[in-house]
Amino acid sequence: MTCKFKWYLFLCLLPLVHCSKEKQEAEAAIQMQTLVREISAYTKTQKPGFLIIPQNGLELAFADLDPHSALDLSYVLAVDGFGVEELHYDGKLNPDPERITAAQQLGQFKPVLVAELINDPATYSAAVQINQQNGFLSFIRTADNHDYLKIPSQIEGENTRDIEQLDDAQNYLYIISTDAFATKDALLDAVSQTNYDVLLIDLFFEEEQLTASDLAGIRRKANGGKRLVIAYVNIGAAENYRYYWLSDWKRGNPEWLKKNYPGYPDEIYVVYWNQEWKDILFGDGNAYLDRIIAAGFDGAYLDNVEAYYFLYHK
């Protein structure tokens, strides 16, 4: 997972600025915008109403990647919400004014899901409140849940309503690590006993893919209300524990495995506009997003959309 993002990238698009790295970033950002739009168009054709929520990279929703400029309507219309990590809390209170401003603007058009990280559990209520004041949905995780592996004991806005669209949601659960659960059934049982309106979960439990039957057991909240089930998918980095990974792959082989991902030894940033990578993501029955649709998920949560920055920076 990546969090705080550099906002000066858009400067490379201004006249008279000549710097090859920034030009590469800008071109790569356009490629990411294109990829997200392509994923949206394809998945919504395969399953009308399929939800697409990119995480981080909020600046992609603005013209020239500048949060102070007009919205890029083709991008905003292609997605159904925006996810963002550590907007106010990155362990401690450390608000990012640029991203907050961007999130506030985008929140006028689409739901914004914020995953905060707090070191002190006593700050939980404050973290919830600051997001509620902006109309954001919040998922507050403590330091021992950094990698989204636990179900928090607290839930905000608990309700019995059927959640038919993302706008209906009052809360969400973000759980994509399986480390805290011995079996797939243990994970599914724990999730089924919650009243979260939206579930962000992985398509797989270890190497076992979730099925339509699995999703049927968690599609309703414990109180009986219907909820949305969204699948996590990494579109900016390849993960060496996924079904698509070949035994001889490593950074540079294939060539689109571009750069090691600091802090995540099992992941490599990819040249995500490469057609081979796109074919892994979508386009036939064995592709990642096609599997997500076939399993019955309501949408996909796209991680590492800001890979265009990290391809060119440490």
Image (cartoon, helix red, strand yellow):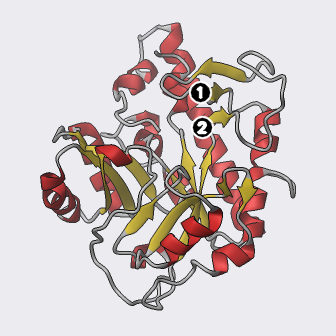
Q: CA distance from mark 1 to mark 2?
A: 6 Å
Residue at position x 56%, y 21% from top?
311
Lateral position of residue 228 relative to residue 249, left or right: left
Which amino acid type corresponds to the residue marked 1 in the rendered image?
Ala
Q: Read off the residue under disc 2.
A: 32
Residue at position x 46%, y 15% from top?
314
| Secondary element at image label 1 | helix
Q: Nearer the viewer, residue 188 or 218?
A: 188
User: Vertically, is 290 above or below 56?
Assistant: below
User: Vertically, is 261 above or below 305?
Assistant: above
| Secondary element at image label 2 | helix
Residue at position x 31%, y 80% from top?
158
Q: State the image coordinates of residue 304 (x, y, percent, origin top left).
A: 53, 38
* For the residues bearing labels 1 and 2, Cβ distance under 8 angstroms: yes
**Looking at the image, can residue 110 be seen?**
no
**Looking at the image, can residue 40 be seen?**
yes
Q: Read off the residue under disc 1.
A: 28
Residue at position x 50%, y 79% from top?
227
Which amino acid type corresponds to the residue marked 2 in the rendered image?
Met
Q: State the image coordinates of residue 249 (x, y, percent, origin top left).
A: 79, 23
